[in-house]
Structures are given as structure tokens and as C-alpha cells.
């Protein structure tokens, strides 16, 4: 069995300078690693600079006509709608996302394109009372070229939720997708080539070097991915003095209050923790149960039953909620985490095993018995790996929930509205969900976290339009000329 499902190979190529090598990106299916999805060369920094230069010259006309942009975005939504089934099947095949979620991802991407097609015609400024006779205006206009760096886990929706507002405001977009989702990115590039002018939406394939070259040439940068890489992206963009936003990891808490409806809460929590094999930034990673030991046991039993009902299987089958991990490295990390949990005195309530079949499948792991400040509780494993922790009172639950460096999202489960609202208010996350899973936020609401989970302005909704544009102030003088 291969040890890596996707690989990059550096090799010398005839015709290139002696010092130049190409890196080959190979994307294969996580459920069937012998299934090759796409293979392509990584772009060199010089090639990235050339792609951005083409985008910059195409942007001038694109940025000058909001009606043309609105129409092109609406056509893009229609083009994706017409290819929904093909797009969903490609997501399943390339990243192992369960088909029901893949369909949801495409529906979200279409809705986003429709929303920003409308938003392209929103007001772009204000009229301000001037201090001297005349007119004082503020208007918003595009930065130029938006450099977008995206992860593999929402291979169509994340590129679209960055690109659509950037395009609506008149920017050209150059995107460096994850090497694990290059097939989906190429699909999108080909689709949008039929609805957008040339060089307005360009994909540059590659790894870190290609991503850094994109930052070095763009006018505004938006990143989604891990916290380690996000720090480097923010530093590079800030070093150039260009606007940057970064959406990164989470270690999201769910607080189960003593009066929570156990059946409802355990179903929500199992789905939020283990759906898509826990490979969402918004997945529930820490379940904090308020009450005595009897309550902890009762909640744990309900959770084990709910998690065990989600058996991992081929993600293309209807009804499957848990597919494989993205690659062998992710599976090794998961196995190591399960071993570390038991070595540190924790107990696996269920799961934590490799499935003996083709693909990177594991059984979703629920564990308990680790201190709240143990590394496995405070750092993201990005797998179906969730800890259960018992606390005596609500104040401690909030303290534990807030005790880590991440602050993306949280959920709270119970019946007493006053208590739910108080906990929601005191949790220090960018998003809070009440009696609903941590995963998922409407596409037209602001999306983002606090602390190390996010940097810069929120994504989605109207916030995104502000991020992808700059304010200019225009003063028109009047009343200085003398009339007879
Ligand atoms: P990753 O950080 O490994 O890669 C993200 C992107 O950055 C890829 O395109 C990658 O090629 C590129 N990259 C890697 N090194 C780079 C560098 N030095 N400079 C520039 N670009 C570089 O993340 P991933 O494994 O693709 O995705 C999983 C991570 O993304 C998880 O941590 C998850 O929590 C996070 N995520 C966050 C959100 C959110 O909105 N907060 C959404 C989805 C995923």
C-alpha cells in the first residue's frame, strides 16, 4: 500500500536552466488511492508573476462595469447549477466528502454566486456634508488582483466564497488551491472560463513556494488553512503592506447544560464532530458536560451510541456521513493521537482504529479522561477525534471553553433560554450556535473567529465586499466662481 495518497516530486526537466526543477502535483482519491484525479506541474515564481500580470491588465475593464460583473456572476451561478451533479461527484472523488455534503457544498457555492451577482449593484459609497460649498463623496473600488490561497476541505465553496465578493467589487482573482484539491480547482477554472472574461479567474497550481509567489505579486490576499501556514501568509502580506485576511483552525467547544435534550444534543454533536471524518474547521472537538459523574456517564453513553451509528463507508453512497481521511499522513496523525490519548491516561469510549480496507478510513474516536489543558484537547487534530470532559458548573464550562488559543466557533445545548444566552455571550468565539451543531453558518452572514483562529476582516456577507475594496474620498468644489 502506498504511504502517501498525493505527492509532490521534484525533478529536473530538459530545457530548464540547470538550477530549475519542477514539482509535480498528483491528486488521488482518498477512498481509492490508485484512482488518479489530476496531475500537473507546480508553477514557478516567475510563472505566477506572469499570471498575475495578465490578471492585472484584464482587471482594468472588468473593474469599470458593475453591470457586466453582475451579469457574469449570474451566468457563473447558472453554469455551476447546470453542472451540479458532476461537480458534487468530483468533490466526493477527490476529497472523500460524503455525497450529501458535497451536494450541499455545490448548492452553497451557487447561492454565493447569485448573492454576489446582486451585491455587485449595491451602493458603493456615501455622500457626506462638506465644510465648504460642493460635494463630498466616498466610493469603494477594487484593489486590483486578489490572491486567494485555499485548503482542500471545501474545494469548490471556499474558492467561490472568496472569489465571488472579490469579483463583484471589480478585482481579478488568482487562486492557489490546495494540492489535494487541484482537480476541483481546474473544474472551476474551466467552468468560469465560459462565463468570465479571459484572465479574470486564474488557477496557479503548486505548493508553498507558489503560494508565497502569489502573495508577493497580489494587491490583496485571502487565506484559509492551518494556523501554522496562516501565520506565514499574514507575515508575508503584512511585510508588503497589503490587506490580508486569514481563516484558520479551531478546537471548538460544545457545552452540554444539565437540562439539554440528550437525544437531540447527542445527534447534533456526533454529526458536528464526526461528519466528513471531522475534517471541518468548525467541527466539534471538545464536548464539555456540566453536572456530576452520573450525568457525564449518561451523556457519554448517548454520544457513543450516536457516534457508532455513523459507520465510515464509501462517501459516494447515499446516507453515508463519515468517509475517509484525506491522506495517509492524516491517518497516521489520527492513530498517533489515539495512542497518545490512552498513554496519557485517557480512555477511548469508541473508535480510534484503522479500517482494514482500501482508502484512508478510520473509526471515529470519542475519548475522555484527559485534562482540559492536555495538548490533544487544546490543539486541532483535524480528524474524527473529539474529547469529552466533565465539569461541575457552568462557570467552569465557560472557563474551559475559553481556555485555549483558538476561538472559531462554539455550541451550547440546553432548554433554559436565559442560561443559553448567558453562556453564548461569555464564550469568546467568533460564532456561537445554540441547540445546533458547531459546523455550518449561513453563506450571507459574517464568518470568522477570534484569537489564533482568524486574522483580519470577516468573510462572507457584506463584510467580504468591504475587504475586497478600498474607500476613496472625492471632493468636488463648487461656489468659488463668481456669477453676474
Ligand atoms: P494548509 O494550511 O496545509 O494549506 C492551505 C493552503 O496553503 C494550501 O493551498 C497550501 O498549499 C498553501 N500553503 C502551504 N504552505 C504555504 C506557505 N508557506 N505559503 C503560502 N501558502 C502555503 O491547510 P489544509 O490542510 O489545506 O486545510 C486544513 C486546515 O484548514 C485546518 O487547519 C482547518 O481548520 C483549516 N480550515 C479553516 C477554515 C476556516 O474558515 N476557518 C475553513 C476550512 C479549513
Image (cartoon, rainbow, N blue to C red):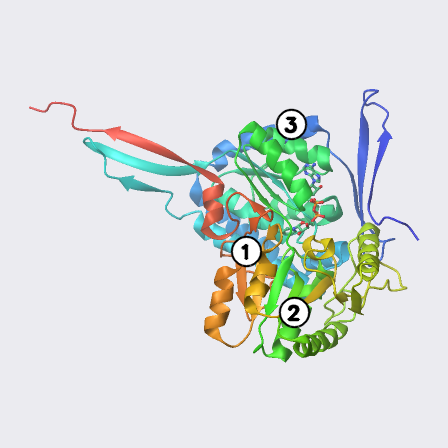
- Vertical position of residue 59 compared to residue 350: above or below: above
| Relative depth, front residue between 235 and 343 | 343
Give the structural element (helix, strand or loop) at label 2. Answer: helix
Distance from label 3 to label 1 (Cα)?
Answer: 40 Å
Residue drawn at the location 81% of the way across and 60% of the way down: 338
Q: Earlier in the sequence, mark 3 or mark 1?
A: 3
- Mark 2 against mark 1, which lies toward the viewer? 1
Identify the residue at the far right of this view.
1
Residue at horizontal 59%, vertical 28%? 53
Left or right of 73 on screen, residue 267: right
Residue indicated by mark 1: 429
Q: CA distance from mark 3 to mark 2?
A: 47 Å
Instruction: Judge left or right: residue 158 versus residue 7.
Output: left
Closest to the observer, 375 or 239: 375
Q: Is residue 179 above or below residue 366?
A: above
Q: Residues within 10 Å of mark 3 (few under 14, many from 20)?
A: few
Residue 442 in view in this figure = no
Circle 1 Cα neighbour tier, 10 Å, few/some/many (<14 / 14–19 / ≥20): many
Give x and y (percent) for residue 315: 76, 64
SS state under label 3 = helix
- On screen, residue 146 versus residue 472, left or right, reads right
> Is residue 257 in sight in this rendering?
yes
**Of residues 454 and 377, the one drawn nearer to the viewer in this rendering:** 377
For label 2, being within 8 Å of ligand 1 is answered no
The residue where tag 3 is placed is 50
- Report, in whole angstroms, how far the alpha carbon at label 2 lies from the one at label 1: 18 Å
Given this view, does label 3 or label 2 mark the residue nearer the observer? 2
Q: Secondary structure at mark 1?
A: loop
Disc 2 designates what residue? 269
Amino acid at each position: 500500500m502506498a504511504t502517501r495518497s498525493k505527492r509532490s516530486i521534484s525533478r529536473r526537466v530538459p530545457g530548464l536552466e540547470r538550477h530549475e526543477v519542477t514539482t509535480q502535483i498528483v491528486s488521488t482519491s482518498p477512498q481509492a488511492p490508485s484512482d488518479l484525479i489530476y496531475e500537473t506541474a507546480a508553477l514557478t515564481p516567475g510563472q505566477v508573476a506572469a499570471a498575475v500580470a495578465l490578471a492585472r491588465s484584464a482587471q482594468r475593464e472588468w473593474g469599470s462595469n458593475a453591470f457586466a460583473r453582475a451579469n457574469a456572476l449570474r451566468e457563473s451561478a447558472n453554469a455551476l447549477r447546470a453542472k451540479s451533479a458532476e461537480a458534487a461527484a468530483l468533490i466526493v472523488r477527490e476529497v472523500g466528502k460524503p455525497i450529501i455534503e458535497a451536494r450541499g457544498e455545490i448548492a452553497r457555492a451557487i447561492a454565493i454566486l447569485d448573492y454576489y451577482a446582486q451585491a455587485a449593484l449595491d451602493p458603493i459609497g456615501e455622500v457626506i456634508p462638506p465644510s465648504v460649498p460642493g460635494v463630498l463623496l466616498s466610493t469603494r473600488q477594487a484593489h486590483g488582483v486578489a490572491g486567494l490561497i485555499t485548503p482542500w476541505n471545501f474545494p469548490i465553496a471556499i474558492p467561490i466564497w472568496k472569489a465571488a465578493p472579490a469579483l463583484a467589487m471589480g478585482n481579478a482573482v488568482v487562486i492557489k488551491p490546495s494540492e489535494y484539491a487541484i482537480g476541483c480547482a481546474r473544474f472551476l477554472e474551466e467552468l468560469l472560463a465560459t462565463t468570465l472574461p479571459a484572465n479574470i479567474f486564474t488557477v496557479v497550481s503548486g505548493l508553498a513556494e507558489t503560494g508565497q509567489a502569489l502573495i508577493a505579486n497580489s494587491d490583496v490576499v485571502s487565506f484559509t488553512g492551518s494556523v501554522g501556514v496562516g501565520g506565514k501568509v499574514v507575515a508575508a502580506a503584512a511585510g508588503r503592506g497589503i490587506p490580508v485576511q486569514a481563516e484558520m483552525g479551531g478546537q471548538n467547544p460544545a457545552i452540554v447544560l444539565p437540562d439539554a435534550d440528550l437525544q437531540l444534543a447527542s445527534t447534533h454533536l456526533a454529526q458536528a464532530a464526526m461528519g466528513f471524518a471531522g475534517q471541518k474547521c468548525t467541527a466539534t472537538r471538545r464536548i464539555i458536560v456540566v453536572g456530576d459523574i452520573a450525568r457525564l456517564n449518561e451523556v457519554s453513553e448517548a454520544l457513543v451510541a450516536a457516534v457508532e451509528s455513523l459507520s465510515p463507508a464509501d462517501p459516494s453512497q447515499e446516507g453515508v456521513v463519515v468517509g475517509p481521511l484525506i491522506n495517509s499522513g492524516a491517518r497516521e496523525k489520527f492513530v498517533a493521537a489515539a495512542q497518545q490519548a490512552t498513554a496519557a491516561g485517557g480512555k477511548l469510549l469508541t473508535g480510534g482504529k484503522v479500517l482494514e480496507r482500501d482508502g484512508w478510513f478510520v473509526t471515529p474516536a470519542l475519548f475522555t479522561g484527559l485534562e482540559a489543558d492536555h495538548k490533544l484537547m487544546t490543539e486541532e487534530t483535524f480528524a474524527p477525534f473529539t474529547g469529552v470532559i466533565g465539569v461541575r458548573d457552568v462557570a467552569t464550562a465557560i472557563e474551559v471553553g475559553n481556555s485555549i488559543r483558538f476561538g472559531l466557533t462554539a455550541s451550547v445545548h440546553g432548554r433554559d433560554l436565559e442560561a443559553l444566552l448567558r453562556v453564548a455571550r461569555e464564550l469568546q468565539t467568533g460564532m456561537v450556535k445554540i441547540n445546533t451543531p458547531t459546523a455550518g453558518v449561513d453563506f450571507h452572514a459574517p464568518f470568522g473567529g477570534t484569537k489564533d483562529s482568524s486574522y483580519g476582516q470577516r468573510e462572507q456577507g457584506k463584510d467580504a465586499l468591504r475587504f475586497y475594496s478600498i474607500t476613496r474620498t472625492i471632493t468636488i468644489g463648487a461656489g468659488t466662481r463668481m456669477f453676474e
